[in-house]
Image (cartoon, rainbow, N blue to C red):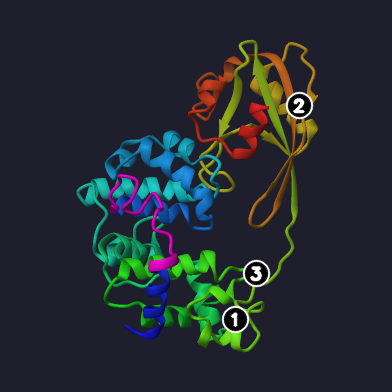
Amino acid sequence: MDGFARRLLAWYDLHGRHDLPWQDTRGHRRTPYRVWVSEVMLQQTQVVTVIPYFERFVAALPDLPSLAAADEDRVLALWSGLGYYRRARHLHAAARVCAAQHGGDLPRDFDTLAALPGIGRSTAGAILALAHDRRHAILDGNVKRVLSRWHGMRGWPGERVVENALWKHAEAHTPAARVADYTQAIMDLGATVCTRGNPRCDACPLASDCVALRGGLVAEIPAPRPARASPERQSVFVVLRDRQDRILLQRRPPQGIWPGLWSLPEAADASGARELASRLAELDGAAAAALPEIHHAFTHFKLLATPLEWRGVRMHPGIADDPALRWCSRTEIATLGVPAPVRRMLAS
């Protein structure tokens, strides 16, 4: 075990996080399934946000067979609000592969595990390290930041050459003993000490030989993702309420934003929205009312949506058998995967 790992583990024993719900705590045993779900949720999402979603998810779907047997609407409803919904669909797809091909368990072979939908090299390493204490390196965002600063690597970690170099460092530092603790330790250090902004270098067990700290480069390392313009996309949501106060929802396609979720029918502008509304329902002369705009930021663009609402409409007979359209009560909406901004608007 090198000095990097030894100091990190000593720090973890005193200052690391030992009470996360996917660890051996709160009456729950650490299992590969719980580790897997947590690692997928933690992709691009902070621990404090993930915890309530994780607890709700595993309470409803406590093991891999229950996840594999669940329908997609159930899975997406439990994920609703956490964002990056492709993660949930990959999680569900991987569970079904495991149920069909691996006896209802996550495989322990690294290559087989990494090949499952939504897992890949780092998540596979985390599952095997945290759940089985097997020596596999990880390289999530927190680990990239710690290693970039300690080794003084100036490039953006998303560049292939930089990432490859970081993998070599990650492999070299991962010890043969206490692998699960080391893996949690380096993630904890990045999340709580070696943070993106305002890092607490005075509390870091690795500060004495950190290249970035010694060179006054902590604020510059790691380099940020190259900036690019974030365009704004405008849209109009069609809100149709029938006389029972049910709302017409439409399942989104499997590709694009909010894939597979139930949302509101959408048009490019107000004129298109009125035309779409008249195709989907018998409006009976109902006038449209504009609701407050929805602003939502995605990774590559910003969405500005204007909802237009028609009340007291009747279902158009021509859409009764369309599986991508359904009239839903408030109770039914709560059981479906609905994008968080749409859910908030409908609940207001």
Q: Position of residue 35 (x, y in %)?
A: 35, 54
Of circles 1 and 2, the one toward us is 1
Q: Callout 1, which amino acid? A: Gly
Q: Position of residue 280 (x, y in %)?
A: 64, 22
Say if mark 1 contacts mark 2, CB within 8 Å.
no
Q: Is residue 260 left or right of residue 134?
A: right
* Mark 1 element type: loop
The residue wearing badge 3 is 198
Q: Earlier in the sequence, mark 2 or mark 3?
A: 3
The residue wearing badge 1 is 155
- The residue sitting at 27% across, 74% down in the picture is 177
Q: In the picture, which quadrant includes the C terminus?
A: top right
* Mark 2 element type: helix
- The residue sitting at 79% across, 32% down in the picture is 270
Q: In the picture, which quadrant includes the N terminus?
A: bottom left
Q: Please give the range of residues in magenta.
A: 13-31
How far apart, in angstroms, are the residues tagged by discs 2 and 3? 50 Å
Q: Is residue 179 left or right of residue 186?
A: left
Which residue is at the front of the view, 254 or 175? 175
